[in-house]
């Protein structure tokens, strides 16, 4: 079945969203948060059905799973987005030309945002909330793995829209069948931008096949560099948090680079907490010798330093100095999030200025590369490209520009 009628209905609904009052949009998001809390049991049952179809040993099930804590966090995120100012309708510049023309530049919604994403049902709420707050309609193309959860989520979203007199077609869930994306990729008349969120293979597939403009939210091969003047206890704490707190997400670290000067002491401290959480290590020759006896140890293969593991696996490599660390980053980074641990302020500042990535850290976990964590309410994804947006693709980036020119008979 063609999805064009769904796309066209969403395109038409976008016009009504642009005319909705700020009060209506805020009320919709507040009601959606309440509906989510009131219907959490139903959403959990839908999510359980999705989980029951998966291999229980798949580490990526963590992305799919909802629980009461995560639903509570989604509801808080919805309320946070509702409290943020509308990014559309702002006067960006205003001037009068010599010929008398009054020229204004304002921010306006993108229009219709298409999102193609994998098995993270929280993304359904995040994208819908950000698009509604910025007056964009959205087309949601989730994965088959999360289809039952996504359908339950969109029912709640449409209920909140109807209750606040906003057209429910402003948010549309497309069929989860993979065949539908081909038609979405060709819908240049109705869709203004596509944003893929998920694995590198998904992102590259969308980028290579879509005729609709694409904003990439890139895969994260993220690094932690433990410099020779690092506080080792701090470095262990950051490494454990960045790898273990949520290993299936894009801002988790994939490689730990360790200065040779402190490698014996640091790796000795790191082993117990990593082993406690079952972290499997893929080590280069130097670190392999130092980690000898670690139960979950393998020799790193040619491709291990380019892997986004998305699980409790991590590569380790020794480097002579920061120059060597920077060369490794230059070769293997996907320009997502990169961190250094060091007490040397000059080295930290050099790291910040030298590393080319969307988010660059000193003495902090890469897990903060997140729209909500950075005070943006939520985000559609982390953009690793440089056109239009970089880093958390959040509310402020869901607008474009429009020129308004007022005259009184001028001709050229």
Image (cartoon, rainbow, N blue to C red):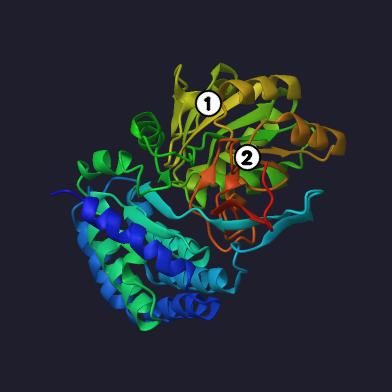
Query: Mark 1: which secondary structure?
Result: loop
Q: Nearer the viewer, residue 296 or 381?
A: 381
Label 2 secondary element: loop
> Which of the two marks, 2 or 1, is nearer to us in this view?
2
Q: CA distance from mark 2 to mark 1?
A: 35 Å
Above or below, comparing residue 283 to residue 253 in the picture: above
In the image, 166: left or right of 155?
right
Name the residue beneath numbered marker 2. Answer: 358
Q: Position of residue 223 (x, y in %)?
A: 60, 34
Horizontal side of 181 relative to 295 (left or right) equals left
Left or right of residue 212: residue 315: right
Residue position for label 1:
292
Q: Position of residue 202 (x, y in %)?
A: 36, 37
Determine the residue positioned at 61% across, 45% down: 366
Q: Badge 1: few (under 14), some or many (20 or more) residues near its Cα, within 10 Å?
A: few
Residue 401 appears in the figure = yes
Tell me: residue 78, above or below residue 306. below
Q: Residue furthest left?
A: 1
Residue 22, quarter of picture: bottom right
10 Å crowding of disc 2: few (<14), some (14-19), many (20+): many
Based on the displayed image, in which of its 4 quarters is residue 291 positioned?
A: top right
Q: Is residue 290 visible?
A: no
Quadrant of the drawing holding the C terminus: top right
Please say if 393 is above or below 224.
Answer: below
Q: Quadrant of residue 258?
A: top right
Residue 90 position in % (x across, y down): 66, 62
Q: Residue at x 44, y 19 (%)?
A: 301
Sequence-first tag of 2 and 1: 1
Q: Say which residue appears at 59% left-offset and 44% top-offset.
A: 389
Relative to 372, say whether 35 is above or below. below
From the viewer's side, name the closer residue of 88 and 305.
88
């Amino acid at each position: 079945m063609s999805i064009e009628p769904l796309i066209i209905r969403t395109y038409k609904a976008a016009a009504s969203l642009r005319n909705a009052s700020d009060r209506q949009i805020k009320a919709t998001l507040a009601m959606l948060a309440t509906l989510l809390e009131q219907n959490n049991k139903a959403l959990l049952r839908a999510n359980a059905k999705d989980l029951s179809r998966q291999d229980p040993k798949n580490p990526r099930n963590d992305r799919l799973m909802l629980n009461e804590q995560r639903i509570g966090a989604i509801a808080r995120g919805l309320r946070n987005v509702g409290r943020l100012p509308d990014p559309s309708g702002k006067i960006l510049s205003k001037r009068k030309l010599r010929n008398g023309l009054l020229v204004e530049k304002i921010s306006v919604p993108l229009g219709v945002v298409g999102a193609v994403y994998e098995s993270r049902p929280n993304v359904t709420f995040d994208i819908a909330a950000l698009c509604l707050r910025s007056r964009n309609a959205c087309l949601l193309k989730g994965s088959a793995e999360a289809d039952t959860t996504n359908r339950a989520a969109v029912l709640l979203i449409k209920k909140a829209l109807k209750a606040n007199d906003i057209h429910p077609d402003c948010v549309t869930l497309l069929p989860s069948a993979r065949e539908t994306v081909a038609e979405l990729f060709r819908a240049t008349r109705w869709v203004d931008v596509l944003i893929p969120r998920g694995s590198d293979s998904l992102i590259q597939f969308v980028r290579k096949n879509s005729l609709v403009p694409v904003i990439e939210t890139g895969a994260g091969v993220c690094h932690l560099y433990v410099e020779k003047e690092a506080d080792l206890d701090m470095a262990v704490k950051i490494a454990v948090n960045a790898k273990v707190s949520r290993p299936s997400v894009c801002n988790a670290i994939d490689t730990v680079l360790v200065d040779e000067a402190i490698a014996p002491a640091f790796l000795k401290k790191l082993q117990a907490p990593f082993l406690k959480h079952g972290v499997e290590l893929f080590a280069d020759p130097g670190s392999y010798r130092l980690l000898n006896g670690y139960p979950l140890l393998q020799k790193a293969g040619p491709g291990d330093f380019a892997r986004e593991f998305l699980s409790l696996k991590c590569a380790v490599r020794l480097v002579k100095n920061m120059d060597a660390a920077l060369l490794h980053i230059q070769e293997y980074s996907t320009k997502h999030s990169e961190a250094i641990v060091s007490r040397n302020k000059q080295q930290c500042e050099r790291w910040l200025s030298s590393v080319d990535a969307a988010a660059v850290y000193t003495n902090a976990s890469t897990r903060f590369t997140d729209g909500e964590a950075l005070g943006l309410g939520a985000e559609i994804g982390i953009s690793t490209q440089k056109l239009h947006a970089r880093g958390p693709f959040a509310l402020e980036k869901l607008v474009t520009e429009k020129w308004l020119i007022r005259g009184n008979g001028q001709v050229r």
